[in-house]
Image: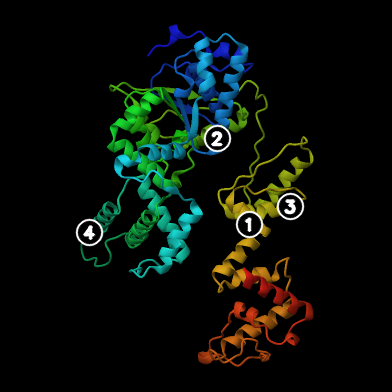
Amino acid sequence: MSIGEAVCWSADRLAVALDQPPPTAEQRAVIEAPLIPGLVLAGAGSGKTETMAGRVVFLVANELIAADRILGLTFTRKAAGELAERIRHRLARLVRVGGLSPELLATLEIGQPRVATYNSYAAGIVVEHGPRIGAEPGAEVIGQAMSWGHAASLVEDYAGDMTDVLLAPSTVTVDVLALSAAMAEHEVSPEDLRDFTSRLLEQIEGLPRTGSYSGSPVYAKVRPLLERQRIRLKLLPLVEAYHARKRSVGVIDYSDQVSLAARIAGQSPAVGVLERQRFGAVLLDEFQDTSYGQLELMSRLFGGGHPVTAVGDPSQAIYGWRGASTGNMREFNRRFGTGGAKTEVFPLSVSWRNGAGILGIANDIAVQCADQHLPVVTLVPAPTRTHPGEIRCALLSTQVEEVSWLADEIARRWAARTPGKSFAVLSRARSLLRPMAAALRERDIPVEVLGLGGLIDEPEVADVVATLRVISDPGSGDAIGRLLVGPRWRIGPRDLIALGRRARWLTRQPIGGLPADSTATAPATPSPAPGGQEETGSLIEALDDLGPAAEYSAEGYRRLTVFSQELAWL
């Protein structure tokens, strides 16, 4: 649809009226694009959020689409909030500038564009249309903690065959939840997965041996892959039990939201008709990180030529581990286009974030990782980025040397920094963040480790986690040990030795052979355990029954007593 004749507010005129920087030629093309499907390849730092907000304001200001008929979806609540705030701020400013029709002013008073996360939008579809497929619209959505609790209890009580699963219960719980989520995202039933996996194993393991070779027909590198397939088969009953548990208590988890919404859209075409009538234009942010389930949902609702603008960059895909696929960008034309005509592809290549030097390296790396079916966006610096940026590289022998070198580099810049300026350290593995943070703190540089892993590694939080582990599993000796020698209880070596001796001594006593408040003294050199195996005993039992106070220092005995009472209370 051509919209040129209907436009009185061009992208440049809107920028002047709203006191915004003028758009680049590429941004202008996206903002003023016709009401047809379009794919925007937005390079890093190219102002995609600014462009999306400009697109919405352009459509509303020119009365091409009513404000409340525009839908914008992204991944996080934070990103959704930022985009919604930009749009609201610009529309409010446009109202103050004047020049809008009375009809437009009236619509802006009663409605604003809807900006939400993919999951919250899917949840709304389930609530509104769930009964069409027999789904309970009022089902409670449980978070990760509750999902873990349900799955963990099933794993602990499971008595089925687990001969191929040589994993700890906690790891099995993680795998069950991950497999359940992946199946939901890809709309795969347990029966389908069981059939496919069984046939795959039979096909590979049944390959004929050639010549005089009588060993395994499977290459050594393939065996771990087959082992994971066998583990998957053993986990499927637990996944089915987890699904049954959710149904019995009337709850769903986050992966169910998208799965159910996609099923609704697939089985009830009327829902797509209603959603297309409700939203005349749709913007899909971070499209490179959408999963198969999200692609199915969006294409079933808004495919076939509806004005959908998808924004993404395959070079920035980061969620492959949770089912996201950059292949969705290749699929855009087939899923959202119409009549066999190719959809428009818009590049955003001007980076406002980095200088030419850094972008040059980024471009070289991006080309090596490029998707052959999509054009590569070669980033160029914005006119305001006159400094090329400084690039330093070091090849060092050990991780310790690497951490020290990087900490020294940051310390040098920290001393000469502009007040209020911050620095970021990125790592491919979370395990490297702890020594890096320690090295920076040694140089009196304040550090914040982002993400859940960083929070758990903080000493205060680690102590809370250790306490919870002791409460749930009294055999967690490492957790008890952390608490005993930690900054709160500070149990010294002499008292730790006495407590350990008490634990070993209690282990050798017959069940019921000691009164609850036994004051028997554990021998300084205990006799060997039967069979020659050294028994470490239970520190929890020793805390419950410390024995004679004379075995400990006075302060140590007091602290151990208070610690024991606190654990009992918890």
Q: Residues within 10 Å of mark 4 (few under 14, many from 20)?
A: few
At a point 57% along the width and 92% down the height, the residue shown is 513
- Mark 4 belongs to which amino acid? Leu
Along the polypeptide, which appears first: circle 3 or circle 2? 2
At a point 49% along the width and 50% down the height, the residue shown is 143
CA separation, marks 4 and 3? 58 Å
CA separation, marks 1 and 2? 26 Å
Q: Which residue is mark 3?
A: 441
**Position above or below: 212 against 36:** below
Q: Secondary structure at mark 1?
A: helix
* 3 vs 1, front mark: 1
Circles 2 and 4: CB atoms closer than 8 Å: no
* 2 vs 4, front mark: 2
Q: Secondary structure at mark 3?
A: helix
Q: Horizontal placement of 514 versus 197: left or right?
A: right
Q: Which residue is mark 1?
A: 457
Q: Residues within 10 Å of mark 1 (few under 14, many from 20)?
A: some
Q: Which residue is mark 4?
A: 207
Depth order, front residue of 427/17: 17
Along the polypeptide, which appears first: circle 2 or circle 4? 2
In the rendering, at what x and y percent does residue 408 appear? 73, 47
In the rendering, at what x and y percent does residue 429 appear? 56, 51
Along the polypeptide, which appears first: circle 1 or circle 4? 4
CA separation, marks 2 and 4? 51 Å
- Mark 3 belongs to which amino acid? Arg
